[in-house]
Amino acid sequence: MSSTTTESFPPREPAASPAGPGARNAGQSLPGPTFLRVLNSEVIKFRSLLSTLILLASTAVVMVGFGALSAWGTGQFADAANRDPQAAARMAAQGGDLAVSVPTSGIAFAQLILGSLGVLLMSSEFTTGMARSTFAAVPRRLPAFAAKLVVVMVTSFVVTAASTWVAGLVAVPVLDNYGLKLDLGSSQSVKLLLVNSVYVAAVAAIGMALGTLIRNSAGGIMSLVGIFFVAPIAFQLIPGDFFTEARKYLPGNTVEPLTAAQHVPDTLEAWQAGLVLGAWVVIPVLLAGILLKRRDV
Amino acid sequence: MIEVNGLTKVYGDKTAVAGVSFTVRAGQVTGFLGPNGAGKSTTMRMIMGLDRPTSGSAMVNGLPYVQHKAPLREVGALLDAKAVHTSRSAYNHLLAMAATHSIPKSRVHEVIEMTGLEAVARKKAGGFSLGMGQRLGIAAALLGDPQTLILDEPVNGLDPEGVVWVRNLVRYLAGQGRTVFLSSHLMSEMAQTADHLVVIGRGRVIADAPIQDIITGKGQSRVRLRTDQPDRLHQLLAERGATIASPERELLEVTGLDPRNIAALALENQVMVYELTPLVASLEEAYMELTKDDVEYHSLPAAEVSHS
């Protein structure tokens, strides 16, 4: 029965797949999934999703928007401080230089958006079934995981750094109106820009690890919110020295010690904060990698 | 060639695949037939290294899938028509898959053309009908021009034209000497597509044989006859060891005697027979026969729902 229809196929089989089985053994040397190829694949996947691009654009808008708003608010505050001794005292307590942190004032939202992006990039692989295609193409799995991690961290760093820079450019003339100076080239400005960008890249990596471990978008994003938004507040509300101490080790509280001009009391030393943030990235990422390798897709 | 050896997968207290062994040879279409929940997809995922076997092994062209240097060029698989990000276009999906193996863009266009997806290639895969999804899955499987193809329920959701297309495609690919392994729960589809069948039920291999053997061997041939003396002939046939069913008056279905012997018996005893028809068991009957004890989800026989 089937033999009668065989000859009719295929009307459009291109001549370009001549390789019958004979050509196969030569196939051993044909290109396979090296890290660079997998990275290229992940870049294609990353840029071909509209939702990803929307999240990146949102980050930029929020960062620049908050930079502008914050510049205006800071100006108002400084204006008031000139007339109101109480406000002046508060300002002095902050070290006097409010303007320098204006460009990064939207960072809390950038970390939420890009952290969620990290979660989504991996969890959506599992929720859509794409993971079966991804890990059939890269059956060793870890190269695909690593490539995705590189893509999400580099993108998060670049988008945060660029939008911080633009936020700074927008803030300078606004602050100037109030007689405040913001030097985007000052070492403190550069430090804030770099540390915050590294920090957001770290949050995105933690998000991706959570997405890999939990494999569910809502669950992953809620865990992220738990670590970065709920825990700091909860730890502050719960009485007891343990929570006061533990609070310092939350990833969200590592930025201040890393960027402060001088050490702020009741925070970690800069080098400790760096190690803590590193551990917050390395441990979940390692765990996610090990489990990704072991679990069924 | 795919060699599966003692493959077992246990989920908690449920054994999905229980020590399955079989070989899928090059140059023919091997059907993997079984009712829903029989363990077909799990077996295929284990062959593809996506699920870790509890025990046993699966080799593709002599190596576990995971160890191949260029896996997509070795094996193409359609495991699930929905193994695609719903928000990505078909073209970008294929492009990303191709990038992992440096498969050129021209090949992406080729498989899109081969599978008839030109018109929808730039649309989001999430909006595809099941049939379009199957075509995209087949396009992805063909990307690396692999020697071995593993297709899980490829005709599921296809329209009749698509079913014929898949049938011709797999026969064509097997004709080129490739190994083609496709699963289905539709026995009629297998009858028209496969050369060899591996039948699975409740995680166990029930039959592993050329399709002809399964049709003729397991489903025994029967003979339908009509006579005006059914009682007398019934008795005579029973004496010769035949098994007889009588679905209606004057109609007998005889198993265990061939038509020539039945005719001789009737002639000897002067019983008039006015119909004598050999019945070749359809694959469907053979399949039901094979799997009747191994179906995970039983439904009421139609006879109990309607008339007999």
Image (cartoon, coloured by chain):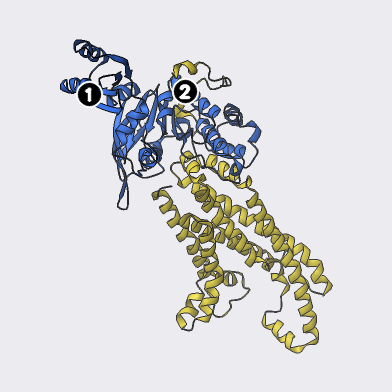
Q: Answer left or right for A5 relative to B215.
A: right
Work out whether residue B300 or residue B71 is closer to the camera in this orientation and state it.
B300
Q: Quadrant of residue B177?
A: top left
Residue A94 position, x and y percent, is 67, 80
Residue B133, numbered label = none
- Of residue A18 and residue A9, the one placed in the foreground of this image is A9
The structure residue drawn at horizontal position 65% and vertical position 38%, both measured from the top left corner, is: B122
Q: Nearer the viewer, residue B72 or B161?
A: B161
- The chain coloured yellow is A
Q: Is residue B99 above or below residue B213?
A: below
Identify whether B280 is placed above or below B122.
above
Q: Which residue is mark 1?
A: B231
Kindly identify the amino acid type of the residue bearing the numbered disc 2.
Answer: Leu
Give the numbered dot on residue B173. 2
User: Which residue shows up at 55% across the image and 27% down it?
Assistant: B161
Residue A166 screen position, x and y as percent: 74, 60
**Closer to the eye: label 1 or 2:** 1
Instruction: Give above or below for A90 relative to B133.
Output: below
Residue B69, position as x, y percentages in the image: 44, 34
Is B49 located above or below residue A284 in the figure? above
Visible residue check, residue A88? yes
Tag 2, which chain? Answer: B
Chain displayed in blue: B
Inspect this view and state whether residue A251 appears: no
Marks 1/2: CA distance? 54 Å
Mark 1 or mark 2, earlier in chain: 2
Image mark 1: chain: B
Q: Residues within 10 Å of mark 2 (few under 14, many from 20)?
A: many
